Amino acid sequence: MPELPEVETVRRRLAPLLEGRVFADVEIADARLTRPFDPVEVARELEGERVAAVARRGKYLIVRFESGRALLVHLRMTGSFLHDGCGGLPDDPHRRAVVRLDDGSEVAYRDVRRFGTWLLLEPADVDAYVDARVGREPLAASYRARHLADGLKGRKAPVKAAILDQRTVAGVGNIYADEALWRAQIHPLAPAETLGPEEVKALHRAIRRALQAGLRRQGSTLRDYRLPDGARGEAQHEFKVYGRGGEPCERCGTPIDKIRVAGRGTWYCPSCQRHARA
Ligand SMILES: [Zn+2]
């Protein structure tokens, strides 16, 4: 599933294609994308809107229009965009929507598993909707260890479950949670509230570094993640633990182990991520 580095990479590619352009013609071919709203009505509402900016909060892409409305896109498992400069997109059975822009180019949305969502919000609703679901941005310059500490305080849940909660840290999912915990040398099952100040500091730094490493390689391609020009991310080649069960830990040589935490496959080093707490 695309996490912060993947969604941010898509945003950076989409922004120059969309900003300043008008959604001239919109076709939404899948009612699941816009439910409970009628896809034909949503498409009609989108037509004529001019894009002011393409933003991101957590794993949401936010296409902000000059009218103040915004189209909130969540890629979920397998959503992706494909841009074609001259409006000649190849046939694709997994295409769920096509936006023709006023410069004649087309942006297609494809989604194999169909969990992705498009939600058109009115100006007064945009920030409230997002802020209720998404916590602080971990790569913002203003993001401090004390913000992470506030999010972990009083939580008996495993620290991994706590940082997967989008209200604790925006945009961290299963991959970058494992990567960050390995970097911070914290066991994924350690209860969140038991982390000391030094551990919280280490985790704060580790979350940022793991996400930045992902961003530098334009995200990771494990399934259907693609950039709008069809390219793949390369971050998966540099994962420290995610998906590396049985391989030696880069730090200590112990084989990476796999367990389940909060229902998710979780990779960690049993030697340098010790579960020192009851
Ligand atoms: Zn190790």
Image (tube, rainbow, N blue to C red):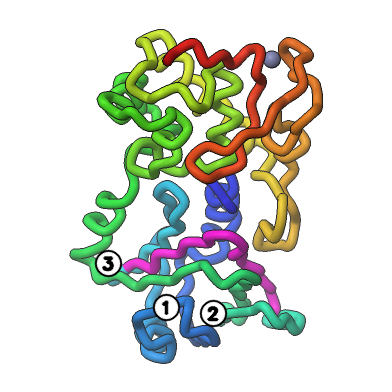
- 3 vs 1, front mark: 1
Q: Which residues are magenta?
A: 70-86
Viewer-proximal residue, 97 or 85? Answer: 97
Q: Position of residue 112 (x, y in %)?
A: 65, 71
* Three-letter amino acid code of the residue under disc 3: Gly
Q: Earlier in the sequence, mark 3 or mark 1?
A: 1
Q: Which residue is mark 1?
A: 34
* Three-letter amino acid code of the residue under disc 2: Val
**Cα separation between marks 2 and 1:** 15 Å
Name which quarter of the figure residue 127 lies in: bottom left
**Cα separation between marks 3 and 2:** 19 Å
Task: Tell whether circle 2 marks a residue whose Cβ is less than 8 angstroms from ligand 1.
Answer: no
**Is there a contact, CB below 8 Å, between mark 3 and mark 2?**
no
Name which quarter of the figure residue 264 lies in: top right
Q: Which residue is mark 3?
A: 68
Quarter of the figure with the C terminus: top left
Name which quarter of the figure residue 257 lies in: top right
Q: Which residue is mark 2?
A: 99
Viewer-proximal residue, 233 or 224? Answer: 224
Q: Residues within 10 Å of mark 2 (few under 14, many from 20)?
A: many
**Is there a contact, CB below 8 Å, between mark 2 and mark 1?**
no
Q: Position of residue 36 (x, y in %)?
A: 35, 80
* Residue depicted at x 29% and y 70%: 121
Helix, strand or loop at mark 1: helix
* Three-letter amino acid code of the residue under disc 1: Thr
Is residue 153 in the magenta section? no
* Residue depicted at x 72% and y 50%: 222
Helix, strand or loop at mark 3: loop
**Cα separation between marks 3 and 1:** 19 Å
